[in-house]
Image (tube, rainbow, N blue to C red):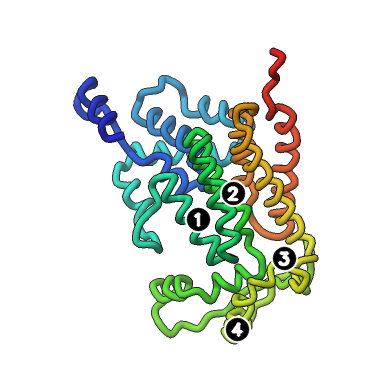
Amino acid sequence: MNDLTTRLQRKVSHGRVVALPAARVAVRVLGDAIFANLMLLGMAWQSGRIALARGSIERAIELNGTAVAKNLEAFRMGCHLASDPHLVERLLAGEESASVPNSLTEVIEDRAQRLKAYWSAKYSLRYRKLLEQAERTLPEPLALTLASQLYRVMAYKDEYEVARMLVSTNFRKSIEREFGQGVRLSYHLAPPTLGTGKDVRKRMVGQWIRWPMAVLSRLQWLRETPLDPFARNEERRHERAWRDRYLAFVELLVSSSETLDISVAEQIARLPADVRGFGHVKGAAMAGASKRWDALEGRLVKNTHL
């Protein structure tokens, strides 16, 4: 890429080539490398290279109907990046880890290690094997999308994971950096025993809850076993079904990509990015994404008769 940048700079006027890690910024800010395209469009527009009104571009994004909020955010982020060249550095600064994953290989390694901490080495290995196949057989932008979104669906935030995050060293350090050492915390939690769906209620509990959460965080080996007390929870069942559907999709992609329409596959691959929130909010988003998936699935296999 550096060689390409050098050659481009030789061909155009000085200062007219702008280089930045667009895919890396898109993953960091928006959760998916696919939004790099709209980010670059925003940069080009802000730099005066596109003779269209901003409102017209944003309206076209809305009419397209695909991940509208995210694409608008990406376009506007690109406008900011063009106005403030140092914004990239600030966006990529402040990592918990010593280094930021750059390449697809680094992203796979990073997410595999997170999944090992999330559950187990066996669970992590399934992710790693699938993504290493994707790295060999699929276009890099699609493989990057799969790397981020497969991790998202596999690391769904159940009771064990929430407990692990709230008692983690990183969480404690972030609180100390913000508020100083010795601060006492209260937690707003919504255990499934206090309601489900729209009836869910959060309760404030004191710092004493850290001890039960520390125990719960060490019981992640119970996840999805017959002894898992949360396994029958409706939200957890939906999350597992969503994950398993996406896993099957990735397995199909890496084994039969030549028979599939990659442009449709890219749209399906991005769907988990639209599933956010918790409880009934996440459930509604998941239902909407599932409907879009159903509509796209019939176009996934190439029509070989044309």
The kind of secondary structure element at disc 2 is: helix
Is 47 rendered above or below residue 185? Answer: above
* Residues at discs 4 and 2 in contact (Cβ within 8 Å): no
Q: CA distance from mark 1 to mark 4?
A: 32 Å
The amino acid type of the residue labelled 2 equals Leu
Q: Nearer the viewer, mark 3 or mark 4?
A: 3
> What residue do we see at 28% from left, 29% from top?
4
Q: Earlier in the sequence, mark 1 or mark 4?
A: 1
Residue under the image location 76 percent in, 66 percent down: 231
Q: Which residue in the structure is indicated by mark 3?
A: 224
> Judging from the image, what secondary structure is the residue with disc 3 in?
loop
- Residue placed most toward the observer, 11 or 113: 113
Assess whether mark 4 and mark 1 are in contact (beta carbons under 8 angstroms): no
State the residue at coordinates (74%, 71%): 228
x and y percentages locating residue 260 in the rendered image: 64, 28
Q: Which mark is residue 111?
A: 1
Q: Earlier in the sequence, mark 2 or mark 1?
A: 1
> Count of labels shown?
4
Query: Few, some or many C-alpha atoms within 10 Å of disc 4 (few <14, some 14-19, many ≥20)?
Result: few
Disc 1 crowd rating (10 Å Cα; few below 14, some 14-19, many 20+) is many
Q: Which residue is mark 2?
A: 150
From this viewpoint, is residue 75 visible? no
In front: 278, or 10? Answer: 10
CA–CA distance in space, label 2 to label 1: 9 Å
Q: Amino acid at mark 1?
A: Arg
Q: Which residue in the protein does label 4 denote?
A: 206
Q: Which mark is residue 201?
A: none
Q: How far across and down, in percent of the image, does residue 21 sit?
A: 36, 41
